[in-house]
Amino acid sequence: MQDLIAGRFDYLCAAASTAVPQMQGNLVKAIAILTKVRSPILPNLESAHEQGLADFEAGAWFAFVLPKGTPAAIVQKLHDATVATMNTPGVRERLREVGDELVAPERRSPEYLGKFIASEIGKWAALLKVANIKAE
């Protein structure tokens, strides 16, 4: 973000929690939110989907990922504690303040996460291969 503000980058895809304060300070200008729908915290910012990138979504997400074979009881205990924390008013309000949103309840299960991660790998792996992008 600092390189964008300093003019060393022409554009940047940043998480809302990083970008919103810079936008509010008129240090950067947003051109789209990279989700299918507008963000409640940025209601005047059109989504990439609205601007013609049909079915495009590249939102930031966070998850706990445990080693393969972690006992189901541990996975469930961590899941339950995380969801309970996410549902507290203080956490919900703080996330809204910084421009982040909680994932919908139907997308919070370990099973959903496993399928989602697999789909993200499939979606981005092809693009990285075509663009010849490699980890350094």
Image (cartoon, grey):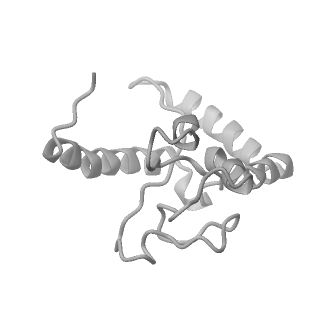
Please report the residue visible at 60 percent of the width from the left and 53 percent of the height from the top: 28
Task: Please name whichever residue, 26 or 93, is drawn nearer the observer in this view of the structure.
Answer: 26
Q: Please state the total of marks drawn on the protein image.
A: 0
Please report the residue visible at 49 percent of the width from the left and 44 percent of the height from the top: 110
Is residue 104 depicted above or below 118 in this figure? Answer: below
Q: Quadrant of residue 64?
A: top right
Task: Please name whichever residue, 124 or 33, is drawn nearer the observer in this view of the structure.
Answer: 33
Please report the residue visible at 28 percent of the width from the left and 47 percent of the height from the top: 124
* Residue 50 percent coordinates (x, y): 45, 78
Please report the residue visible at 48 percent of the width from the left and 27 percent of the height from the top: 66
* Residue 87 percent coordinates (x, y): 76, 51
Q: Is residue 2 left or right of residue 86?
A: left
Is residue 30 depicted above or below 27 in this figure? Answer: below
Q: Quadrant of the C terminus?
A: top left
Task: Please name whichever residue, 56 or 119, is drawn nearer the observer in this view of the structure.
Answer: 56
Q: Quadrant of the N terminus?
A: top right
* Residue 98 percent coordinates (x, y): 73, 49
Q: Is residue 23 left or right of residue 114?
A: right
Q: Residue furthest right?
A: 90
Is residue 23 depicted above or below 133 in this figure? Answer: below
* Residue 56 percent coordinates (x, y): 37, 65
